[in-house]
Image: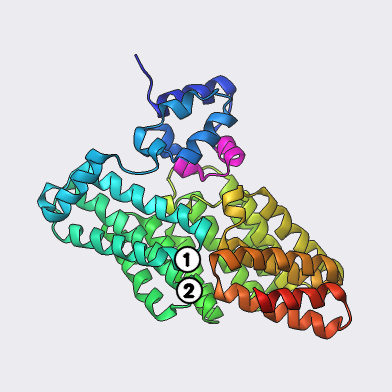
Amino acid sequence: MTSTFGERMRALLAERGMSLRGLARAVHYDVGYLSKVANDRRRPSLQAAERIDASLEAGGELVALAPSPVRSGALNPDDEDRLVHVTQNPMRLDSVVVEGLAATLASHRRIEDVVGSSAVLSAARSHLDLVLRLLKETRGPLAKDLSAIASEASQFAGWLSTATGAHRAAGPLYDQALRLGLQAGENNLAATALSMRGHLAWATDDIVAMASLSEAAGQLASAAGTRAVAIQQGGRALAILGEKQEALRAIGRAEEVLDGPTDRDDPDGLYFYSSDLLTMQRGLILAYLADSPAEHAKAADLITVGIEGLPTEIRDSEWVAWYRVQAAAARAASGEAEESAAALRVALRIISATGGRKTRGDIAKTHRWMAARWPSNPAIAELGEYLRSA
C-alpha cells in the first residue's frame, strides 16, 4: 500500500530519531506548518518537500509523494475548472476549492519573498475579494475554514499595504483579519492580526500602541510562533521606549516560548518564523539599546548571523533587506565604515529588484550620517553614487 507524504514523513522522522521541532530548525519552516504536513492536513510546497526530503535523507522519495498540484506549482486543470464553476455558483463550494484558495494565498506569500510587495498587492487584493464573496454565500462546516483563509488573506493584504506605505488601507484590513479570525474560532489568527496592528503602529511611529497591541497579542496567542512574534515585538517597543531590562527580558521570553513545547499549530502565514529570525530581532533590540561601539558591533553581528541562517529565497527578500540596513547602521555606529557601506549596497541591490520605499529611505538616511562622519571615505562616496543611480 502506497504511503502518503505525511505517513512517510512521520516514518522517516521516527527512523532518524528526529523530532518535528528539530526538523523545523533544519529546514527553516515553522513547526506548526510541518505538523500539518506530517498529518496530511496541508500540502507541502515544492520547496518544502525538497527541503524535508533532503533533511530526512529520503533520496527523492518524499518529493515523489508530494501531491501533483505542488509539483506543478499551480492548481491542476480539474481544480481550476472547479474554482471557476464555484465562482459562478458559490453554493457548489467544496473542500478542494477551499484548499485551492489556501494554496493560492500561500503561493502569493512565496512570490512576494522574491519580487516584493508592490508586485503582489493587486493579485492579493483580488484573491481576498474572491474569498470574501464566497464566504458570504457559504454555510456549514466549510464556512469556518473559509473564514480562516479570509482572515489570513486580510492580514496578508494589510502587510502588503503597510510595506508599500498605504497605512490607511492597512488598518481596516487588520481589523477585518481580527474579526474573521475570531469568527473562525482561531485565536492564533486573531492574535496575528493584533501583532500586525502593532507592526503598523511601529511603522507610523506610535510606539506606545505597538507595545500594548503586542502585549494583547501575546496574551491571546497559544501557538509558540505566534506568541513569540508578539512577545519579541513588544520587546522591540520597550527597547525603543528606553526600557532596557524589560526589553531584554521580553526577547528572552520569546526565545523560551519558541523553543518550548506547544500543542497548537501556528497560522500558515508564519511559515518564515524561526530561531534565526528571532536572533535577528534580538540583534535589533540590542541595536536600539547600544551605547558603545562594542555594543553596536554585537548587535550588527547578531542580525547578520540571523540573516545568514535564513533560506536563500527569504534571505534576499524585500523585508529582510530592511534588517540588512539595520545591521549596516549598527556596523557604522561601531566605526566599521567600509563593512557598513558594503552591506548597504547589498540591501540596495535587493530593493532595486523588489521595491521597498521605507528601506530605501533608511539606506539614504544611514548614508547621510556616514558621509557626515567620514566625508572623504571612498567606499561611502561610491555608495552615494550607487544610491543616486539605483
Which residue is pictured at 53% across the width and 42% down the height? 261
> Left or right of 72: which side holds 101?
left
Classify the position of the C terminus by image quarter: bottom right
Q: Which of the two residues, 368 or 115, is positioned nearer the viewer here?
A: 115
> Residue 357's x, y, as percent?
55, 75
Residue 172 as seen in the image, left or right of residue 26: left
Who is closer to the viewer here, 59 or 384?
A: 384
Where disc 1 sits, the SS reads: helix
Q: Which residue is mark 2?
A: 164
Q: Pointer 2 and pointer 1: residues touching (CB < 8 Å)?
A: yes
Q: Depth check: give the residue in front, 260 or 86.
A: 86
Give the residue at x 43% y 32%.
Answer: 38
Residue designated by label 1: 117
- Magenta residues span 21-33
When asked about the image quadrant of residue 246, the answer is: bottom right
Q: Residue at x 73, y 69 (%)?
A: 287
Instruction: Tell me which residue sits at (44%, 55%) in the image.
Output: 109
On the question of residue 56 being in view, the answer is: yes
Q: Main secondary structure of the magenta part?
A: helix
Lateral position of residue 360 relative to residue 286, left or right: left
